[in-house]
Amino acid sequence: MSTSFRLSGPLTLRGSVRLPGDKSLGHRYLLVSALARGRTLLGNPGSGEDLRATLRLVESLGVRVECREGEWLIESPGWRKLKAPRAPIDCGNSGTTARLGCGLLAGLGLPAELLGDASLSRRPMERVITPLRRMGARIQSTDGCLPLRLEGGSLQGMTYRLPVESAQLKSALLLAGLFASGETTILEQGGSRDHTERLLGLQLEAQESGRAWQVQASTLEGLLDRWPRELSLPGDPSSAMFLVSAALMHENSQLELQDLLLNPGRLHTLQLLRQAGAGLEWELRQTVLGEPRGRLRLRGGGDWILPDLRAADLPLLLDEVPALAALALQRGQRWQVEGAGELRIKESDRIAEILRVARAFGVEGQEGPEGFRLSGGPLRPPGEIQAGADHRIAGMLWALSCGLPESPHIHGREVLGVSFPELPQLLRSLGSRK
Ligand code: S3P
């Protein structure tokens, strides 16, 4: 059933909250919990559907998961006793489940089939299939997309230079490499999210041509030896960006986000905003499994300009472009994004979707294969608009609505369920019309 929703703004956001757990960490912690024999209690998993897809994947291998209020209890027989799934695994909308899951299943040598929804079934998987085949994996796919059939077998380590800056690809290969014979070395030019490297405790080997990451069987042993039996997920900084954007739209906003993931690679958006003059500060409180976390404080308003985004910025803030676009639109400014071709193959073609939203609000835009430009100017909000099939575009619409006196009816609220179903309620509880 499709639901429509409307915020009566403009909304000032005030208060202090802890956001649902980071999605990238959630997938990884679930996968490792499935490898570690015994019980792991995972706190703050949130209620996003993406993480449920990884939960289905681990359950299909024989891991038991009890979902309690605000925490999941995971009980695994240990990686040596995981079983081949009896039915295809439905990865839903989750690219991280499909790609990391493919790497892990290939490493475990378990036959399995991976499926996804219509959007995930259009996204490229050959970037993972090609290098995994080089390691010896037998993987069938008709057109380099889901469904994929893994046929089992053992892997050999390899040295591989990533052809695209993708954390999902890098992580899939590092996970596969944990079970391969010999060493697996992954070379990357720039840098994408480094959660898997931090989790595995990898040492950075800086090379002239970029960075090198190496794993082998002992990396897995070390990880399982130090695996904590109880851990909780810090708040998701990509989800936070919708609140941050919405709050920055009003002078009177004052927001505090507690226990937020402060991984330096995930702070790029906040750093750009702070450098531009936005009232943001954060403070590190602790580091858990190599991941810094702490508190973010924000004051709204201010006379600053959202900087254009360059190719070098993109791998570190790809998921946050829709939230930033909401801010650019609300501020009525011209805004340009370059080197963002990967946006076209996310859960939707996000370049086309951002321009669809801009045009619906009366703002012109131009697009190229790898980027776009918004021409700025006053907003003329429509009476209603479709959220579409992409959760981050839906989040963009919610954030933008907080900045408007008359917000449109947003149809299709349920797509937010992929990552951040809590967003409308949070905006309502933190927001007031002062
Ligand atoms: C993710 C990596 C990023 C990001 C995605 C989650 C991850 O994708 O956009 O939402 O958890 O590894 P890339 O593989 O394009 O870096």
Image: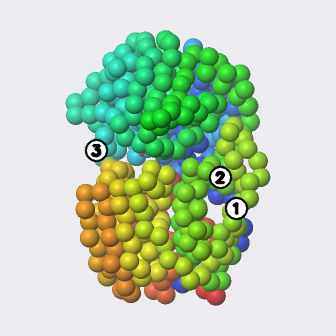
Q: Of the two numbered discs 3 and 2 on the same chain, state the one appearing first in sequence.
A: 3
Query: Gap in Å between the C-alphas at discs 3 and 2?
Result: 32 Å
Q: Is residue 167 left or right of residue 34?
A: left
> Pointer 1: what residue?
282
Tell me whether the residue at label 1 lies in contact with that at label 2, contact meaning CB atoms closer than 8 angstroms.
Answer: yes
Q: Is mark 2 within 8 Å of ligand 1?
A: no
Q: Of the two numbered discs 1 and 2 on the same chain, state the one appearing first in sequence.
A: 2
Mark 3 belongs to which amino acid?
Arg
> Pointer 2: what residue?
262
Q: Can residue 233 be seen in this view?
A: yes
Residue 251 quadrant = bottom right
For mark 2, give the secondary structure: loop
For mark 1, give the secondary structure: strand
Q: Is residue 228 left or right of residue 357?
A: right
Residue that appears at 48% across and 35% down:
208
Q: Position of residue 315 (x, y in %)?
A: 45, 50
Residue that appears at 57% across and 16% down:
217
Number of numbered discs on residues: 3
In this view, the residue farthest toward the left is: 142
> Pointer 3: what residue?
122
Q: Where is residue 282 in the image (x, y as percent from the top left)?
A: 70, 61
Which is more foreground, mark 3 or mark 2? 2
Q: With respect to residue 425, does 128 lie above or below?
A: above
Q: Of the two numbered discs 1 and 3 on the same chain, state the one appearing first in sequence.
A: 3
For mark 3, give the secondary structure: helix
Mark 1 belongs to which amino acid?
Trp
Which is more foreground, mark 1 or mark 3? 1
